[in-house]
Image: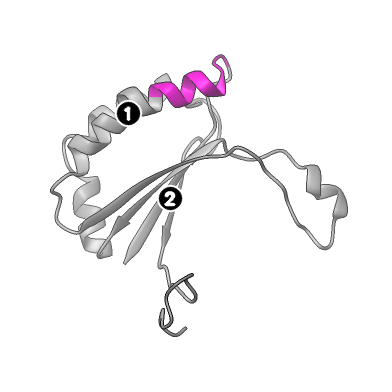
Protein backbone atom coordinates (compact mmCIF):
# COMPACT_ATOMS: atom_id res chain seq x y z
CA UNK A 1 0.00 0.00 0.00
CA UNK A 2 1.05 3.59 -0.68
CA UNK A 3 -0.25 6.57 1.23
CA UNK A 4 0.15 10.05 -0.22
CA UNK A 5 -0.21 13.01 2.13
CA UNK A 6 -0.95 16.51 0.82
CA UNK A 7 -0.44 19.18 3.47
CA UNK A 8 -1.31 22.85 3.17
CA UNK A 9 -1.76 26.20 4.91
CA UNK A 10 -5.15 27.91 4.83
CA UNK A 11 -5.52 31.11 2.85
CA UNK A 12 -4.37 33.95 5.07
CA UNK A 13 -7.27 36.19 4.02
CA UNK A 14 -9.93 33.67 5.13
CA UNK A 15 -10.81 32.05 8.42
CA UNK A 16 -9.98 28.43 9.07
CA UNK A 17 -13.74 27.77 9.19
CA UNK A 18 -14.27 29.32 5.75
CA UNK A 19 -11.37 27.33 4.27
CA UNK A 20 -12.68 24.09 5.73
CA UNK A 21 -16.25 24.83 4.61
CA UNK A 22 -15.04 25.39 1.04
CA UNK A 23 -12.96 22.22 1.18
CA UNK A 24 -15.93 20.13 2.33
CA UNK A 25 -18.56 21.71 0.04
CA UNK A 26 -16.54 22.11 -3.17
CA UNK A 27 -13.22 20.29 -3.07
CA UNK A 28 -14.38 16.95 -1.63
CA UNK A 29 -17.00 16.46 -4.38
CA UNK A 30 -14.25 17.13 -6.95
CA UNK A 31 -12.09 14.52 -5.21
CA UNK A 32 -14.94 12.03 -5.21
CA UNK A 33 -15.33 12.54 -8.96
CA UNK A 34 -11.58 12.17 -9.52
CA UNK A 35 -10.99 9.04 -7.43
CA UNK A 36 -14.22 7.01 -7.25
CA UNK A 37 -13.82 3.82 -9.23
CA UNK A 38 -10.11 4.39 -9.93
CA UNK A 39 -8.18 1.12 -9.96
CA UNK A 40 -6.10 0.73 -6.83
CA UNK A 41 -7.61 3.69 -4.95
CA UNK A 42 -8.56 2.72 -1.39
CA UNK A 43 -9.22 5.74 0.81
CA UNK A 44 -9.27 9.51 1.14
CA UNK A 45 -9.01 10.92 4.66
CA UNK A 46 -9.29 14.66 5.40
CA UNK A 47 -7.49 15.90 8.52
CA UNK A 48 -7.99 19.38 10.01
CA UNK A 49 -5.27 20.40 12.47
CA UNK A 50 -7.14 21.55 15.62
CA UNK A 51 -4.10 21.75 17.86
CA UNK A 52 -0.36 21.38 17.52
CA UNK A 53 2.47 20.54 19.88
CA UNK A 54 6.08 19.74 19.19
CA UNK A 55 8.07 17.43 21.39
CA UNK A 56 11.70 18.14 20.61
CA UNK A 57 13.73 16.62 23.42
CA UNK A 58 16.72 18.80 22.54
CA UNK A 59 14.79 22.08 22.45
CA UNK A 60 12.06 22.44 25.11
CA UNK A 61 11.10 25.86 23.71
CA UNK A 62 9.89 24.15 20.54
CA UNK A 63 6.74 22.95 22.36
CA UNK A 64 5.10 26.22 21.37
CA UNK A 65 6.25 26.20 17.75
CA UNK A 66 3.68 27.22 15.14
CA UNK A 67 2.28 24.47 12.96
CA UNK A 68 3.70 24.30 9.45
CA UNK A 69 0.32 23.28 7.99
CA UNK A 70 -3.38 23.66 8.79
CA UNK A 71 -4.84 20.61 7.11
CA UNK A 72 -3.85 17.54 5.20
CA UNK A 73 -5.40 14.77 3.20
CA UNK A 74 -4.30 11.15 2.96
CA UNK A 75 -4.84 9.21 -0.25
CA UNK A 76 -4.31 5.46 -0.05
CA UNK A 77 -3.48 3.32 -3.09
CA UNK A 78 -2.58 -0.33 -3.59
CA UNK A 79 0.66 0.43 -5.43
CA UNK A 80 2.89 3.30 -6.60
CA UNK A 81 1.95 2.54 -10.20
CA UNK A 82 -1.77 2.84 -9.48
CA UNK A 83 -1.15 6.05 -7.57
CA UNK A 84 0.77 7.51 -10.53
CA UNK A 85 -2.02 6.52 -12.93
CA UNK A 86 -4.66 8.10 -10.68
CA UNK A 87 -2.66 11.33 -10.37
CA UNK A 88 -2.60 11.62 -14.15
CA UNK A 89 -6.38 11.45 -14.56
CA UNK A 90 -8.12 14.43 -16.24
CA UNK A 91 -10.54 15.19 -13.33
CA UNK A 92 -7.56 16.08 -11.14
CA UNK A 93 -7.07 19.32 -13.08
CA UNK A 94 -10.31 20.73 -11.60
CA UNK A 95 -9.07 19.83 -8.13
CA UNK A 96 -5.76 21.61 -8.64
CA UNK A 97 -7.56 24.66 -10.07
CA UNK A 98 -9.65 24.82 -6.88
CA UNK A 99 -6.64 24.93 -4.52
CA UNK A 100 -6.40 28.73 -4.61
CA UNK A 101 -9.91 28.96 -3.15
CA UNK A 102 -8.96 27.53 0.25
CA UNK A 103 -5.18 27.20 0.55
CA UNK A 104 -2.14 29.44 0.25
CA UNK A 105 -0.63 28.92 -3.18
CA UNK A 106 1.90 31.76 -3.20
CA UNK A 107 4.15 30.45 -0.44
CA UNK A 108 7.07 28.02 -0.66
CA UNK A 109 6.05 24.41 -0.14
CA UNK A 110 2.37 25.33 -0.42
CA UNK A 111 1.56 21.63 -0.86
CA UNK A 112 3.80 18.94 0.53
CA UNK A 113 3.42 15.46 -0.88
CA UNK A 114 4.70 12.51 1.10
CA UNK A 115 4.66 9.10 -0.54
CA UNK A 116 4.66 6.61 2.30
CA UNK A 117 4.66 2.91 2.88
CA UNK A 118 2.57 2.13 5.95
CA UNK A 119 3.11 -0.80 8.27
CA UNK A 120 0.46 -1.36 10.92
CA UNK A 121 2.37 -2.63 13.94
CA UNK A 122 -0.33 -2.46 16.59
CA UNK A 123 -4.05 -1.83 16.29
CA UNK A 124 -6.58 -1.70 19.09
CA UNK A 125 -8.87 -4.72 19.06
CA UNK A 126 -6.71 -6.66 16.61
CA UNK A 127 -4.60 -9.43 18.11
CA UNK A 128 -2.30 -10.02 15.15
CA UNK A 129 -1.75 -6.83 13.16
CA UNK A 130 1.40 -8.16 11.54
CA UNK A 131 5.09 -7.91 12.10
CA UNK A 132 7.63 -5.23 11.34
Displayed quadrant of residue 39: bottom left
What is the x, y in percent for residue 104? 51, 26
Q: Is mark 2 on a helix, strand or loop?
A: strand
What is the x, y in percent for residue 92? 24, 36
Label of residue 27 in the image: 1
Which sits in the foreground, 7 or 42? Answer: 42
What is the x, y in percent for residue 98? 33, 24
Q: In this view, does 115 lie above or below 74?
A: below
Q: Hey, which residue is sitting farthest top in the picture?
A: 13
Residue 111 among those drawn in magenta: no
Which sits in the foreground, 51 or 70? Answer: 51
What is the x, y in percent for residue 118? 42, 68
Q: Give the range drawn in magenta.
A: 13-22
Q: Main secondary structure of the magenta part?
A: helix
Q: How many residues crowd mark 2 within 10 Å: few (<14), some (14–19), many (20+)?
A: many
Q: How many residues crowd mark 1 within 10 Å: few (<14), some (14–19), many (20+)?
A: many
Amino acid sequence: MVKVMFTWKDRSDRTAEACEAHYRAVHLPLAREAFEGVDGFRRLVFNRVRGHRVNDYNDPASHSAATDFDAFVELWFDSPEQMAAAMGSPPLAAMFDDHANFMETDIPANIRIYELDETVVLEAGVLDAGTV
